Amino acid sequence: MMVTMETIKIHSKEKFNIEVKDLSKHMPVLDAILHYCEKYNLEYETAASLISTDLKRSLRGEAEELNFIPKSSRLPI
């Protein structure tokens, strides 16, 4: 009988956000998040709780540019 041990990887917010920001230099933010989830076999719902405010802001801007969500109002500067 062979016993296998699976390693449980703990994903911290800091590690997640740093790696996604590094990946987003080469691909869109949404793709970087999905790539990270696939690479580490992480569920998308879990990743949603790890996203920082800065990353959410970048993701929102990207989604607005692609017309995935309505553009938010901005004051003219």
Image (tube, rainbow, N blue to C red):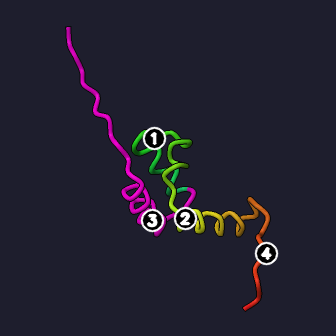
Evaluate if marks 3 and 4 touch, with contact meaning CB atoms under 8 Å apart: no
- Residue at (76, 64) in percent of width and height: 67
Mark 3: give few (<14), some (14-19) or many (20+) Cα within 10 Å.
some
- Residue at (79, 64) in percent of width and height: 70
Q: Determine the CA span between mark 3 and mark 1.
A: 17 Å
Q: Which badge, 3 or 1, comes first in the chain's sequence?
A: 3
Q: Determine the CA span between mark 4 and mark 2.
A: 18 Å
- Residue at (20, 13) in percent of width and height: 2
Mark 2: give few (<14), some (14-19) or many (20+) Cα within 10 Å.
few
Identify the amino acid type marked 3: Lys
Q: Which residue is mark 1?
A: 42
Residue in the foreground of this view, choosing between 11 and 66: 11
Quadrant for the C terminus in the image: bottom right
Q: Which residue is mark 3?
A: 21
Q: Which residue is mark 2?
A: 53
Q: Determine the CA span between mark 1 and mark 2.
A: 20 Å
Residue 8 lies in magenta, yes or no? yes
> Which span is picked out in magenta?
1-30
Q: Determine the CA span between mark 3 and mark 4.
A: 26 Å
Q: Which residue is mark 4?
A: 73
Residue 66: give its label.
none
Residue in the foreground of this view, choosing between 62 and 56: 56
Q: Nearer the viewer, mark 2 or mark 3?
A: 2
Give the secondary structure at mark 4: loop
Quadrant for the N terminus in the image: top left
Identify the amino acid type marked 4: Ser
Identify the amino acid type marked 2: Thr
